[in-house]
Image: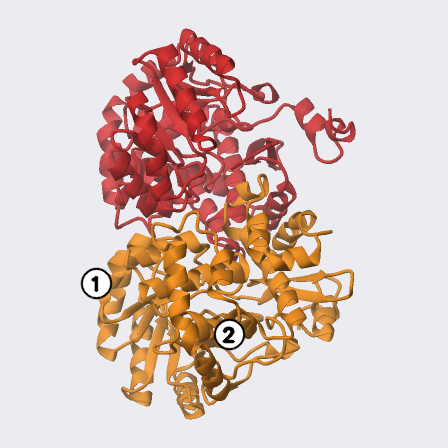
Chain colours: A orange, B red
Amino acid sequence: MNPEPDYSATYVTLRTSDGAAGHGLAFTIGRGNEITTAAVRALEPLVTGLAVDDLLADLGAFSRRLTGDGQLRWLGPDKGVIHMAAGAVVNAAWDLYARRAGKPLWDLLAGLSPEQLVALVDFRYLRDALTPEEALDLLRAAEPGRAARRARLLAEGYPAYTTSPGWLGYTDDKLVRLAREAVAEGFTQIKLKVGADPEADLRRLRLAREALGPGVRIALDANQAWGAGEAVERLAPLAPWEPYWIEEPTSPDDILGHAAIRRAVAPVRVATGEHCHNQVMFKQLLQAEAVDVLQLDAARVAGVTENIAILLLAAKFGVPVCPHAGGVGLCEMVQHLAMFDFVAVSGTMEDRVIEYVDHLHEHFTTPVAVRGGRYLAPTAPGNGAEMRAASIADHRFPEGPVWSAGPS
Amino acid sequence: MNPEPDYSATYVTLRTSDGAAGHGLAFTIGRGNEITTAAVRALEPLVTGLAVDDLLADLGAFSRRLTGDGQLRWLGPDKGVIHMAAGAVVNAAWDLYARRAGKPLWDLLAGLSPEQLVALVDFRYLRDALTPEEALDLLRAAEPGRAARRARLLAEGYPAYTTSPGWLGYTDDKLVRLAREAVAEGFTQIKLKVGADPEADLRRLRLAREALGPGVRIALDANQAWGAGEAVERLAPLAPWEPYWIEEPTSPDDILGHAAIRRAVAPVRVATGEHCHNQVMFKQLLQAEAVDVLQLDAARVAGVTENIAILLLAAKFGVPVCPHAGGVGLCEMVQHLAMFDFVAVSGTMEDRVIEYVDHLHEHFTTPVAVRGGRYLAPTAPGNGAEMRAASIADHRFPEGPVWSAGPS
């Protein structure tokens, strides 16, 4: 579905008059950044000139200001380009807030009171699934264990899984070699792309299973390739090789389709979320019992604020969150959400893993550290989105030297 | 939800080397046209240089080319800015096709064979609700009556309803006067905006009902103002005054919310669709029995091609289509879809009405003609989207004289 991606980003920096800055980005896979850039510029008048203290004191109101503009919301509402742009700006504001507090975002969030966290959430369309009172109860129940879990997180890190072995186009030998290397490094879960040739899907899964044995989880990712009925048919011959989950088996909008697939393919789990465009869609995936694994993304919805609501919904329904990452900076950003979830929301890492892809981290000032198959908890202030000045200068489109040099 | 709209459009013209042209537009309510314009420009390389005969011979493939681009689809997929831009371009191609054929779009579509129509549809994510065979059966069943219905349409037109009396902000006297005038003109249905002050909602509905009597349908439109439970509570006191439908009672993405509202408020009908972003969402609204009235829009989804799929889905589920219109050019375009539906798909006008708002028609070369509460079938070639050259020159942003003159 996504041939020839060219990982890109619309990079946002909020600057304050006292010289501080916060960073966020809208991730894309190539062409179209001029569209997301135009969307960020359209939001600029809603941000410029605000008093920083007021803005940071109520990031719920700030998020609603960006997503609720009476004219711009027509372009969504709450979806696609305009929503991704709002997410980049909202994340930049959270980065600014965390830097000002001198804390990594996960720790900042995990230090907010249950009342402060609930006040950030826009419950307008959520109350049939989660009331403010239920969210408060849930956060209060997790409060006594925060300190112990924070210490455990700092000591042990958070489990990761790796997609690196499983790209379509790798030879069978390379697949097996990379899968073995991943397990040797400490990963307990890998992921394979499927959805093109059925025989290749079966052969690759079988090879990986034979190489790794029964103890390693092998997830599959179809990247929306199938219709609902087709997904069930295509998974049947793969089931004996015990895939752990099937990710994006169909359209990311097809809540009822995911629910039907889940009923048919159990015990194979159904996972989705990287293209799920807002909290109302996540709410329904949970209400319809359509997912076993919720894969939120740091840069698709309207930023940290909306992702807090999504984590609360997942906790209410008892569905594990295993964030989508990879791309550009998604690992750096999304780890904060999973770690906050562990410390202050769900309170568990059981059956939870953050996706890890080993590329492009060198462009960030605080790149992720994955050791022995686990993300180490970041300790630098901020949300992880800040890119290195040299990377920005080199890759700025179209005037950066990487572009003006032409195709390599 | 949409205060101070400033009706606008991103206007698209496809030009061929032999001097022909086709027109389409993405409708917005103000700021943000630079974003939709950037999206249309991003699609341009997918269109420029194509052989016109090939393009028009397979508008299904053309539509999939625009929505399926491996990099740009990340910005949706199939939703928001990038999808609206695709819709504008697809609609321009259909306009070109209809002009070349010398027919109004509705008549062109109603002259295609069932096989040709089915070949236009992208069934990838639809087969669990509608198979190509079912679509073919449905179209073939309607085929024998096409000629008679075409004659009837040309003679009698298609029923309209009017939103003009019911805007928030009108005085009670003006509401009653306009409602009476609408009925005197021949309308059998009007619509009132609700969702702000509960007492005002009740008072206005009561005044309209008392003025018009029991025989006139009075629809309500909440413009997404409520959560699902709130919608049920807010409608309860209004029910004795027999509203015909409640439109957009909650988030347009909330399929399960609409289904719950529908179960609770019957016999008041639930209507939605103007913000429904693609055929997968419409499919689920029907599967979940969430709507009594499907309000497709000419410029929200990926154009005529996707709307053919949506009309087929509605016919399969037996749900009447009452298109959204108003704005800029939406009446001009969407009438073609409803009329095509009558002649070749559902085969009926029963409980079907096209929205009508009496503004901005003067900017179009073939403005709608509504007489006695009915849309007269257009006979000019094309899809209705072509704007007058003077209107384009005057309103082009930012250099047009309307803008450079400053606020009036």
For the point 45% across and 75% down, the residue is A343
Nearer the N terminus, badge 1 or badge 2? Answer: 1
Residue situated in front as seen by the camera: B97 or A207: A207
Q: Quadrant of residue A392?
A: bottom right
Q: Amino acid at mark 1?
A: Ala
Residue B44 place in picture, x, y as percent: 60, 47
Q: Residues within 10 Å of mark 1 (few under 14, many from 20)?
A: some
Name the residue tied to disc 2: A335
Is residue A252 in sight in this rendering?
A: no
Residue situated in front as seen by the camera: A80 or A105: A105
For the point 56% across and 35% down, the residue is B25
For the point 60% across and 44% down, the residue is B36
Q: Amino acid at mark 2?
A: Gln
Please state the chain letter of the residue tagged with numbered disc 2 in the rendered image: A
Name the residue tied to disc 1: A264
Where disc 2 sits, the SS reads: helix
